[in-house]
Image (cartoon, rainbow, N blue to C red):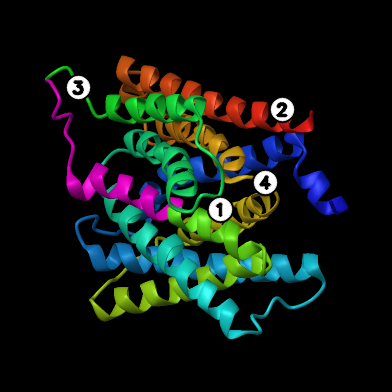
Amino acid sequence: MSKESSILSKPSIVFILACTCCALWGSAFPCVKIGYTIFSIDTQHTPSIILFAGMRFFLAGILALVIGSLAAKTFLLPKSRRTWNHIAKLSMLQTILQYFLFYIGLANTTGVKASIIGSANAFVALLVAVLLFHQEPMTSRKLLGCILGFAGVVLVNLNQGGLDGGFHLTGEGFIFLSTVSYAFSSVFLKQYSAEDHPVLLSAWQFMLGGLVMMLVGIITGGHMHPSGAPSFIMLFYLGCISAIAYSLWGILLKYNPVSRVTVFSFMTPVFGVLLSALLLHENTQALGWNCIVALVMVCIGIYIVNSASAQKKNNSVY
């Protein structure tokens, strides 16, 4: 085991870096909604939403490329058809499809609800890794954690009036489907990182995906009206979220099992709910009993999955 892989597999390092990623992702829920306001984007006009997302991710790709190249002390340039093929697949799943669904879904639901539904990505990624790609075994503890987590996701969509919970395909439905796209991209990123630098993959797939989304947004009539410096500061911050978080996440996936990394996603809805309550004044929903119970169930579910992975690792030592 190399020194780099040894350090990046330490539980304390995984915890710090994974929580940093989740804090950044959690802040994206309210910041994207604020971005709609300060860019005067009509949330019912899909082309403008796609254009906004495309600008964010193209910028994220440039930032990731600069940061990664400086860290590696060499320009991170794809040099083979295989690498470009990997980038194209990741771009479709991790940027174009995931964020097309995410941005439209977020425009049609609250930041609090979206952040909790988004927490399903940890469980969906685990199921994809276990059942479809056989990257790790399924255990009863992991299954119990998945059931609890999904129960929490369902609970947040309930209200006192019954089971309908105000669920809309283009709102909460699209947010959930975006987590499915994310799950597949996480598994592919781990697989491809064995052959290519994870930051190189993240940077170029962001640029390719962002460019495609910008072109689609422009061609279909998308438009934005920035309101001065705050608009560009927000866009830069949103770009940094993706550049930093996905690059760190890719590095962690390279040196750790999918379940060990993705289980830390429980921190994303925690940060998302708190920051949505703070920045979007969604205090009533954030402090509602079903939201609090859902968060607790999600956290317990992922803790069980995490402890199952840790137990398996300890048993393998003997």
Q: Determine which residue is flagged by label 1.
A: 241
Which of the two labelled residues, at mark 4 and mark 2, occupies the earlier sequence position? 4
- Looking at numbered disc 3 in the image, what kind of residue is underneath it? Asn
Q: Quadrant of residue 69?
A: bottom right
For mark 2, give the secondary structure. helix
Q: Amino acid type of disc 2? A: Asn
**Image mark count:** 4
Magenta stretch: dominant secondary structure: helix
- For discs 4 and 2, the disc positioned in front in the rendered view: 2
Query: Residue beneath label 3, please?
Result: 159
Point 51% across, 54% down: residue: 186
Question: In the rendered structure, are the residues bearing label 3 and label 2 in contact, judged by CB atoms less than 8 Å apart?
Answer: no
Q: Are marks 4 and 1 in contact (CB under 8 Å)?
A: no
Marks 3 and 1 close (CB-CB < 8 Å)? no
Badge number at residue 315 = 2
Decide: is 101 above or below 213.
above
Q: CA distance from mark 3 to mark 1?
A: 32 Å
Question: Which residue is identified by label 4?
Answer: 256
Q: Is residue 285 left or right of residue 266?
A: left
Secondary element at image label 4: loop
**Eye-nearest disc, 3 or 1:** 3
Q: Quadrant of the C terminus?
A: top right
Q: Give neighbour class at mark 1: few <14, some 14-19, many 20+ (Cα, 10 Å).
A: many
User: In the image, what residue occupies the spot 38% across and 57% down?
Assistant: 98
